[in-house]
Image: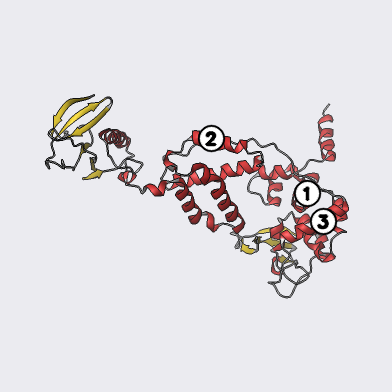
Amino acid sequence: MLTQTQTSAMPFPIMEGYIRTDQKCKYCGKMDWIVLNSGNLKFWKCPRHDFIVTRFWIGIQWQGGREKIRCDRKGEPLKYFDKADHTLGRIREELEAKTFDPNDYKKVNISEVKFENAIMRYFHRHISKKKPSYVKHFLSDTKSIYIPHFRGRDVREIRSKDIEDFHDELEKDKKKGAERKSKLLVQLKSFFKYLYKIEMLDRIPSFSPVSIVDKRRGYVLLDDFFKVLDEVPVYIHGYYITLRYLGLRTAEGSALKSKDWDWKTEMVKIRRSFSGRQLLETVKEDNPDEMPIPPELKRYVKPSINPETFTFTNTEGRPLMPDYASQIWLKAARKAGIKANLKTATRHSFCTDLREADVDADADMQRILMRHKSIESTQRYGQVSMELKKKNMAKVLSFK
């Protein structure tokens, strides 16, 4: 039921700011209104005709001038008096806290805040600049997982409950492992951090972590490693041994060139990598990672006159690609009766070798040699052997 509570041409300013409209009655062309109550809602209506105001603005004295606010913080127009009144209340709080910025109340193109448009814009502006392999996976995840779940949603309206629902949906998918689910949530959180950074969001919704069982990576003894090596062509031996002795990623080993090896100082520089078939110089080109060259490698790595020559090549003289080398390793490992892929037998086992050599006494040194950003990553790789457990137990028992 509508009840008339006030008749006024224009409400007078109250406290900081005031509400106005520049609409006229489309029947009589006048701008005098009565305020009607309908439950908890208020309307401005022409006293002579059935015409209700649907366009308001807020006037604010700001930095020596007057600002006209026509939208709320979401960029939506002030179509109702109650929305204008609520927005004015928020502006007054911000003025008191000295956090008010009129740029926070600008009109937003609704299509820009739709989830599918916002995440694709994020993809083109940021993700597309990363490694091609990561770009490919992110785009696939976006189109097959993120967009189908959040399609049509206003990113500003997505709350922690919505993230929980997405989390629950991932948990129901038995085909995806815990680490895969965790990465999907990390990627999504990075997207919302970007929205917060560009001030499209007031806050970032909370993300519950995915519980991941800490499964230590496998370990291949050196004796077993060389058993597999006996089953592969001789020209590829140096590549596998370099990965094992230096703990390199397969894509880094494939990208090594003659100029990276300094035999005088016995140091090798890690400054590029393959992403798919694309060769990428690392961001640390001016200050690359350096690793000491183990003496055993000298018999497998031969210097070249041409500094741009790739260290490890196939029979046609082309770079030895990681996927090709991994396939050869798997076939050879099956023949040798060893259950381990190339990464497990090289980089992961290298980390365990560090522990066996008591490098774990200095955890940060282990992280440095593995070239990880965080010690948590290093700890997931290392496998603790029975010999090392016995050694440390002996230290404990010696105190008794």
Q: Secondary structure at mark 2?
A: helix
Which corner quadrant of the image does residue 87 belong to?
top left
Q: Amino acid at mark 3?
A: Lys
Q: Which residue is mark 1?
A: 349
Tell me if residue 222 comes above or below residue 157 in the rendering.
below
Q: How many marks?
A: 3
Which label is found at residue 208? Answer: none
C-alpha span from label 1 to label 3: 19 Å
| Rendered location of residue 267, percent (x, y) | 72, 62
Q: Amino acid at mark 1?
A: Ser
| Rendered location of residue 33, percent (x, y) | 15, 34
Tell me if residue 106 comes above or below residue 208 in the rendering.
below
Nearest to the observer: residue 197 or residue 369: 197
Q: Residue shown at 72%/56% (left/top)? A: 248
| Rendered location of residue 52, percent (x, y) | 21, 36
Whether tag 1 and tag 2 are in contact, CB under 8 A, the answer is no
Q: Amino acid at mark 2?
A: Asp
C-alpha span from label 3 to label 2: 43 Å
Which of pointers 3 and 2 lies earlier in the amino acid sequence? Answer: 2
Q: Quadrant of the C terminus?
A: top right
Q: Which residue is mark 2?
A: 165
Q: Residue shown at 30%/33% (left/top)? A: 86
C-alpha span from label 1 to label 2: 39 Å
Which of pointers 1 and 2 lies earlier in the amino acid sequence? Answer: 2
Q: Which residue is mark 3?
A: 331
Tell me if residue 100 comes above or below residue 306 in the rendering.
above
